[in-house]
Image (cartoon, rainbow, N blue to C red):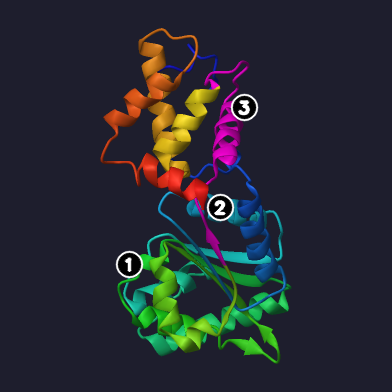
């Protein structure tokens, strides 16, 4: 709707996990490096947490894209873990198995899974299970299944790597499960972006969308940071609405007052407060 007005090829602030738009702040680079390390070194498991909208899902798509470039990995991606423990194992076997079998009970499923993992190992492939929104797991037995899956080993080699991705409460759940917690080889927590990274994040997405000239002024960047609390999803919401407002008012540049206006429109949907961010800045 507003793309041609601002000289853009496409909307730059869609809240979809498009790997083209990933902005690698130092912490996002570190998170991806740790996840790739766990997989490539065939470690047991990794835990990636972050606040709602911090970029976890997008980072998981980048990880999946990286692994798909390399033929030595077979990856399962569970994006809806609100399953029973039996359904959970079935989903993993279903995604890994080329010829879809029919299994009547969990014992048969585990035998089939073990056979698949050994076959992958024999063909030089490593099996990876990525579970997004893992804090949404409602069947606590799934965590026990995860622990059991990590018992699939050969000598000192894990036959699969599990990556758990979720909001901070996921860490609290894992902490209460020492047998699973001890199998987490790497963990990382994504925090909100700082003010400078917020500006770079916005500029990066505009560049990908084809922007040829500045659209936001300096005070606008500051106001976006304060209003969004540095959370990428909220930055997207504010910037998208600001571009729409700027188009509707035939502005040549997005300024602070436009950001204040759209932030007021989004009041109640944005986390934290400006005072809260300013306090964080001083810590």
Circle on res. 82: 1
- Quarter residue 72 falls in: bottom right
Helix, strand or loop at mark 1: loop
Q: Residue at x 57, y 37 (%)?
A: 201
Report the quarter where the N terminus lies: top left
Q: Nearer the viewer, mark 3 or mark 1?
A: 3
Which residue is located at x 71 percent, y 61 percent?
71
Q: Which residues are magenta?
A: 188-217
How far apart, in angstroms, are the residues tagged by discs 2 and 1? 21 Å
Q: Give above or below for 245 relative to 193.
A: above
The residue shown at (50%, 31%) is: 222
Mark 2 / mark 1, whichever is N-terminal: 2
Q: Position of residue 143 (x, y in %)?
A: 41, 80
Q: How crowded is the residue under tag 3: few (<14 C-alpha within 10 Å), some, or many (20+)?
A: some
Q: Which is more N-terminal, label 1 or label 3?
A: 1
Q: Is residue 14 visible?
A: no
Given residues 197 and 50, the one toward you in this image is 197
Is 105 situated above or below 204? below
Question: What residue does disc 3 label?
Answer: 207
Q: How many marks?
A: 3
Image location of residue 167, percent across then percent down: 42, 62
Quarter of the rendering containing residue 155: bottom right
Mark number for residue 59? 2
Q: Nearer the viewer, residue 77 or 237?
A: 237
Residue 195 lies in magenta, yes or no? yes
Q: Residues within 10 Å of mark 2 (few under 14, many from 20)?
A: many
């Amino acid at each position: 709707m507003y793309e041609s007005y601002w000289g853009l090829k496409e909307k730059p602030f869609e809240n979809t996990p498009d790997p083209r738009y990933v902005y690698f702040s130092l912490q996002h680079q570190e998170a991806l490096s740790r996840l790739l390390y766990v997989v490539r070194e065939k470690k047991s498991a990794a835990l990636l947490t972050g606040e709602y909208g911090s970029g976890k899902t997008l980072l998981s798509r980048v990880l999946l894209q990286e692994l798909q470039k390399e033929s030595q990995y077979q990856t399962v991606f569970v994006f809806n873990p609100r399953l029973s423990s039996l359904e959970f194992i079935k989903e993993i076997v279903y995604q890994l198995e080329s010829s879809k079998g029919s299994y009547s009970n969990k014992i048969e499923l585990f035998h089939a899974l073990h056979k698949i993992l050994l076959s992958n190992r024999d063909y030089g492939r490593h099996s990876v299970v990525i579970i997004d929104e893992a804090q949404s797991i409602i069947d606590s037995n799934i965590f026990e299944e995860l622990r059991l899956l990590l018992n699939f080993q050969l000598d000192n080699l894990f036959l699969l790597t599990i990556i758990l991705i979720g909001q901070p409460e996921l860490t609290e759940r894992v902490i209460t499960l020492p047998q699973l917690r001890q199998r987490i080889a790497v963990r990382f927590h994504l925090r909100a972006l700082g003010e400078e990274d917020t500006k770079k994040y916005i500029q990066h997405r505009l560049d990908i969308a084809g922007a040829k000239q500045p659209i936001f002024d300096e005070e606008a960047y500051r106001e976006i940071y304060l209003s969004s609390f540095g959370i990428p999803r909220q930055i997207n919401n504010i910037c998208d609405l600001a571009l729409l407002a700027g188009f509707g008012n035939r502005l040549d540049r997005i300024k602070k007052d436009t950001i204040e206006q759209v932030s007021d429109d989004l009041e109640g949907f944005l986390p934290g407060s400006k005072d809260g961010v300013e306090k964080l800045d001083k810590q």
